[in-house]
Image (cartoon, helix red, strand yellow):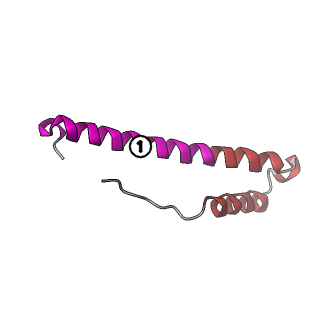
Amino acid sequence: MALSKAGPEARAQYSHQLAVYTLRQFVEARKSLDLDRDAKSKLPPSHARDPRAMQALQNERVAMKGPRTVSATS
């Protein structure tokens, strides 16, 4: 869409959609960081360097996130 030729309403709608999308991305990134921090704090220090423990941690984090869905707003 050529935003420079769009009317003020179209620009406002686009700006709103972009803000909503950005906020969703921020919230998802924050959840991911929180999950990483929580999961790592539960691991004993001796397991923190074990590749199998780290793989299990990664698998658990992916399972907790669930399938990713994308929704479009009109």
Q: Residues within 10 Å of mark 1 (few under 14, many from 20)?
A: few
Q: Quadrant of residue 57?
A: bottom right
Residue in the picture at 28% in, 42% down: 14
Where is residue 54 shown, x and y percent of the image?
74, 56
Residue in the picture at 77% in, 62% down: 52
Q: Is residue 35 left or right of residue 74?
A: right
Work out which residue is located at the far left of the displayed protein and give it. Answer: 5
Amino acid under label 1?
Answer: Val
Residue occupied by mark 1: 20
Q: How many marks?
A: 1
Dominant secondary structure of the magenta stretch? helix
Q: Nearer the viewer, residue 54 or 63?
A: 63
SS state under label 1: helix
From what the image shows, is residue 48 above or below residue 16?
below
Where is residue 72 shown, x and y percent of the image?
36, 56
Where is residue 18 shown, x and y percent of the image?
35, 42
Residue in the picture at 86% in, 46% down: 45
> Does 25 appear in magenta?
yes
Residue in the picture at 48% in, 46% down: 24
Q: Quadrant of residue 27?
A: top right
Q: Is residue 6 left or right of residue 42?
A: left
Q: Is residue 28 left or right of residue 5?
A: right
- Magenta residues span 3-31
From what the image shows, is residue 62 above or below residue 26?
below
> Does 46 appear in magenta?
no
Q: Quadrant of residue 55?
A: bottom right
